[in-house]
Image (cartoon, rainbow, N blue to C red):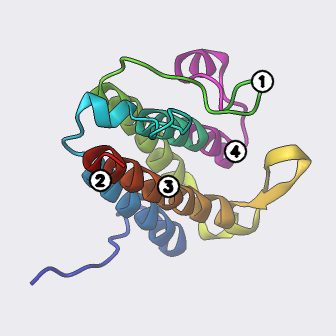
Amino acid sequence: MHLFDLAPQQGMTPVIGMLHAAVEDTYHRLQATCAGLSEEELYYKGPNGSLNSIAQLLKHLAVVDLHWVYRLRGESVPDELVQQFGPMATEEGRLPEIEGVPLEDLFSQYDRVQDMFRQACLILTDEDLERKVPYENGAEATVRWGIWHIADHSRYHQAHMAWLKKMCRTGL
């Protein structure tokens, strides 16, 4: 029998560790959802070609999480990382197009962000949870909400990815 649990990372404070464990668990589920995707599945954009592909969603999650890492640190994302990872959205507000990047490369980039996130969590304390960080459109969020949001945002898009994979495989 398999036991489901969250395993806080050693060296993290209790609540930070639990929140990080939720993000880590969600990331492992994302990897499982995407394991073995064909190139067709990775770049499938729905029957009319108007949806975001799994590749776009993976890149989007990595970029958004990268921005959260730097929010948690109280810093701006360095220009070199913005160049490497790209923007969160196009000028039209859509996810940037992506083509021909292998799944392994997308996850390699995302693994790097996850490691940066882990490093950021190792220096946060439970007292930091109520600290406010800049969010979108001039709003603010607490560190606690930001870490939770990383996991929640990933789960939200995992549902899209599972749906796209099913549509591609069944020809819907």
Bin the neighbour count of mark 4 within 10 Å (Cα to Cα): few under 14, some 14-19, many 20 and up: some
On the image, numbered disc 2 is attached to which residue? Answer: 33
Q: Is residue 86 left or right of residue 91?
A: left
Mark positioned earlier in the residue sequence (1 or 4) = 4
- Amino acid identity at mark 2: Thr
Q: Nearer the viewer, residue 171 or 70?
A: 171
Q: Identify the residue at image location x=53%, y=47%.
A: 120
Mark nearest the camera among 3 and 4 is 3
Mark positioned earlier in the residue sequence (1 or 3) = 1
Q: Which residues are magenta?
A: 66-88
On the image, numbered disc 4 is attached to which residue? Answer: 71
Q: CA distance from mark 2 to mark 4?
A: 28 Å
- Amino acid identity at mark 1: Glu
Mark positioned earlier in the residue sequence (1 or 2) = 2
On the image, numbered disc 1 is attached to which residue? Answer: 91
Residue 61: x percent and y percent?
52, 43
Give me the disc on residue 154.
3
Q: Identify the residue at image location x=90%, y=46%.
A: 138
Q: On the rendered image, what quadrant is the N terminus found in?
A: bottom left
Q: CA distance from mark 1 to mark 3?
A: 23 Å
Q: Are marks 2 and 3 in contact (CB under 8 Å)?
A: no
Q: In the structure shown, which secondary structural element does the residue marked by tag 2 occupy?
A: helix
